[in-house]
Image (cartoon, rainbow, N blue to C red):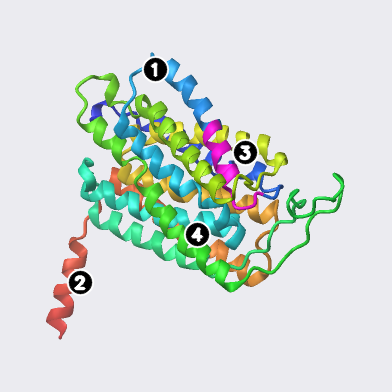
Amino acid sequence: MGPQEQHQIFGLVSALLATLLYGSCYVPVRWFEAGDGVYFQWLMCIGQLIDSVAVQAFYGWPPMFPLAMLGGFFFALGNALTMPIMNGIGMAVGSLLWNTLTCIVGWGVSRFGLFGSPKKVPLDNVMNVVGIIVVFIGGFFFATLKHHPVKVRPAPWQRPSLPFNADLKGEQEISKTKRILAILCTVIVGCMYGNMLTPIGYLSMHAHDGLLKHYATYFFSWCIGAFLTSTVIFMFYSGFRKNRPLINPELTLPSLLAGLMYGGASFYFFLANEHLDPIVAYPFLTKAPGIVCAMWAVFLFKEIRGSWDMTHLFVGILVTVAGLTMITLSKVTSFDYTWFEKVQVWVFMRS
């Protein structure tokens, strides 16, 4: 989609809605024991698929696009690891870390035109690169945080005789090995999420039909890809568990609600990437939701406590916001850097 067809205000509104929904979608499920998260991710993709049917009808039932389904495949693979990550390092830290990596991967794909994507060069390339470096630095602050596990009611497989109104499961210490594995999983999630829109960008760039240039046209195909992948994951998981998957019935409706919220967020994410260049939209939409998620984790779930961790969290957020601001400004304005050359000449003359 060319600049003349982009609507910046519409893109910014879509980005704001996507940020709020992405940052809040995990809240409904954090009250319940999710186990290894496979049942959760399957239901979440079902909820997302329900949203996509409404979008598909709105756009006049466009055809299926197998390549767009590949983006859903990337999403589902990453989404299957989110619950183990949150169980290991918490909702706030996990979200902020994988969002940092998603931001960098998505920015790199758009900036350099990788995997057949359209190459997007901002007006101020220096500011854009510095902004992404600042965002990356912000991620280091989040990696040092210690989270306190959320108190939830044990699932049936943990205490089968537990009455329905029993006390919540107390806080347990997370092992160092589990934390390290969770952090490593954020790398995989970041790579998957960072490429989940790449196939759609390629299709949109090579489309000849005006309707097919719209990212939302591919939303249903994307959700079908995610649903099929999550179903296959659940099938193999059930086989591995000898037809005894860990399923918490209390997680069913919250997971579907999370999927509906995530589906709405993804739709607005598509619109934002269509009306804002991905080189700006991707960093913003992959980092800002983590900040919203962190606010839920701090003020509602009390995952982050203590002056040291709270200071690191908010310093990391401030650094991240500074980087996002630079990335956004790099799209709309360019600064004169001749003063830097003059300083270099002055230093050279003085020496």
The picture places residue 264, in percent across and down from the top left corner, at 51, 31
* Most frequent secondary structure within the magenta stretch: helix
Q: CA distance from mark 4 to mark 3?
A: 31 Å
The picture places residue 97, in percent across and down from the top left corner, at 48, 59
Q: Which residue is mark 2?
A: 343
The picture places residue 47, in percent across and down from the top left corner, at 56, 31
Residue extent of the magenta highlight: 34-46
User: How many other residues sit within 10 Å of disc 2, few (<14), some (14-19) or many (≥20)?
Assistant: few
Residue 318: which numbered mark, if any?
4
* Mark closest to the chain's N terminus, 4 or 1: 1
Which structural element holds mark 3?
helix
Q: Which residue is mark 3?
A: 255
Q: CA distance from mark 1 to mark 3?
A: 27 Å
User: How many other residues sit within 10 Å of disc 3, few (<14), some (14-19) or many (≥20)?
Assistant: many
Q: Quadrant of the C terminus?
A: bottom left
Tag 2: residue type?
A: Val
